[in-house]
Image (cartoon, grey):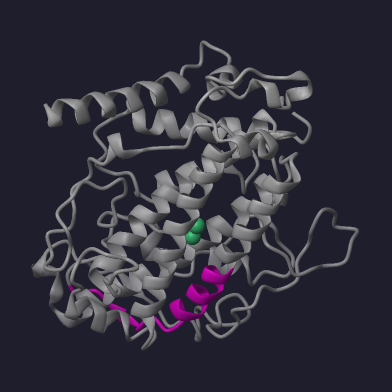
């Protein structure tokens, strides 16, 4: 009975999510299921029904459909970040009461520590931050009478079999990654910006082709030494990839927010993604120069030819000034990209595309997963101030 009840609940959640992905019905009416929509897109106080806390009435005043769409997409992204960071913490971090689960893996932790002696602590803290991000955004959604996001139905991807990992279903796969490392050169460029259509060289060209683990897949991955080190190096560059994505996503979506308190949520969480990114940008530069003897993956010397110079030098971790808004304006040190809207390079759809290309969802058997995530992304990118 207990099991059946849980199953029924799961199916209800799935049905709700799947329903939202239907393209045949108005996206916005589905998004706000249970909430009527007031003039100019604002949620009128009288629209909140029984069961909604009294403070929701006040908090939801002036919150638009677009605001809710942005918050729901961010909740989904933070749930996915939490899922991947928990896997890193179980094997390479510090499992404890703040971030429970797993027992850590000494060979993997040792390899990570080649990048920084405090790597495990940073992994733990990044994980705790992500847990707090999705928990807060979902609670905030509930506080304004909107549906929180739940992706539990899609926890289908198997765990690593390495000693230290929990054996539970996952939303993300860290064992077949194709890591785009162009964020490295993008933040070093003085005359290019992805918002102008520019593209950027890979720091680790090998990682952007093929499929590589960023966590040990099983105990067989603990040796030889340069193999487990390559896995830790891959994690180091993947950390930067994930967190620079959040650094662009929040300021991009913030441009579509109407309600000041919702804007405050985005402006207060987004820069923490950047704090993470800056840390990981620094650590990735310490990745050991090597060739993985099992698959030929090369981590080159980024400080010497054919690399080296301003675009690759490992201590140039602060963003360089570059073009922004117009080539007629002076170069400025900024987060990049931040152009808003469907088709924008830093928005929600772009994030889903980048994470899919990264291989994060490889092995997800349920095709509705990407449909649900993509639909949430389109709605977030379509949000405009005032609507
Ligand atoms: Fe986050
Ligand atoms: Fe993050």
- Residue at the far right in the pictured view: 328
Label count reads 0
Residue that appears at 55% across and 24% down: 31
In this rendering, position of residue 268 left or right of residue 82: right
- Horizontally, residue 378 falls left or right of residue 61, namely left
Q: Quadrant of residue 54?
A: top right
At 59% across and 79% down in the image, what residue appears? Answer: 317
Q: Residue 133 at x, y = what percent?
A: 49, 55
Q: Find residue 369 and report its horizontal and vertical position in percent.
A: 35, 33
Quarter holding the N terminus is top left
Image quadrant for the C terminus? Answer: top right
Quarter of image, res 299: bottom left
Which residue reaches farthest left?
220
Q: Position of residue 259 (x, y in %)?
A: 74, 41
Q: Tell me which segment is drawn in magenta.
A: 275-293
- Up-down: is 299 above or below 3? below
Instruction: Note whether 372 is above or below 119 in the view shown.
Output: above
Q: Percent position (x, y) of residue 82?
A: 38, 55
Residue 180 visible in image: no
Side of 203 relative to 85 (left or right)? right
Residue ID at (51%, 74%): 281
Specify whether 57 is left or right of 313: right
- With respect to residue 138, does 60 lie above or below? above
User: Is 214 or 79 nearer to us in this picture?
Assistant: 79
In the depicted structure, whether residue 197 falls above or below residue 228? above
- Residue 57 visible? The answer is yes
């Amino acid at each position: 009975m207990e099991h059946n009840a849980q199953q029924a609940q799961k199916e209800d959640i799935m049905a709700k999510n799947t329903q939202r992905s239907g393209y045949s019905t108005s996206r916005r009416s589905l998004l706000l299921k249970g909430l009527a929509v007031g003039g100019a897109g604002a949620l009128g106080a009288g629209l909140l029904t029984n069961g909604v806390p009294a403070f929701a009435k006040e908090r939801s005043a002036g919150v638009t459909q677009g605001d809710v769409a942005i918050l729901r997409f961010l909740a989904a992204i933070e749930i996915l970040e939490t899922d991947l960071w928990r896997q890193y913490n179980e094997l390479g971090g510090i499992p404890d009461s703040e971030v429970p689960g797993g027992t850590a893996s000494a060979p993997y932790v040792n390899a990570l520590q080649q990048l920084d002696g405090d790597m495990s602590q940073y992994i733990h803290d990044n994980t705790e931050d992500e847990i707090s991000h999705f928990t807060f955004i979902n609670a905030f959604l509930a506080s304004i009478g909107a549906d929180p996001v739940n992706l539990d139905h899609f926890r289908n991807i198997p765990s690593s079999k390495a000693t230290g990992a929990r054996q539970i279903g996952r939303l993300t796969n860290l064992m077949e990654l194709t890591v785009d490392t162009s964020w490295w050169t993008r933040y070093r460029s003085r005359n290019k910006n992805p918002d102008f259509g520019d593209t950027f060289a890979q720091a680790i060209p090998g990682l952007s082709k093929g499929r590589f683990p960023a966590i040990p897949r099983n105990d067989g991955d603990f040796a030889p030494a340069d193999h487990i080190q390559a896995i830790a190096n891959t994690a180091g560059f993947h950390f930067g990839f994930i967190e620079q994505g959040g650094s662009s996503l929040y300021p991009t979506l913030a441009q579509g927010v109407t309600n000041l308190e919702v804007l405050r949520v985005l402006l207060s969480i987004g820069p923490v993604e950047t704090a993470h990114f800056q840390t990981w940008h620094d650590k990735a530069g310490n990745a050991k120069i090597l060739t993985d003897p099992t698959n030929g993956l090369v981590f080159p010397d980024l400080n010497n030819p054919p690399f080296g110079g301003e675009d690759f030098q490992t201590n140039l971790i602060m963003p360089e000034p570059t073009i922004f808004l117009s080539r007629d304006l002076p170069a400025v040190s900024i987060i990049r990209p931040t152009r808003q809207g469907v088709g924008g390079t830093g928005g929600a759809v772009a994030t889903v595309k980048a994470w899919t290309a990264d291989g994060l969802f490889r092995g997800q058997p349920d095709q509705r997963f990407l449909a649900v995530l993509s639909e949430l992304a389109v709605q977030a990118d379509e949000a405009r101030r005032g609507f």
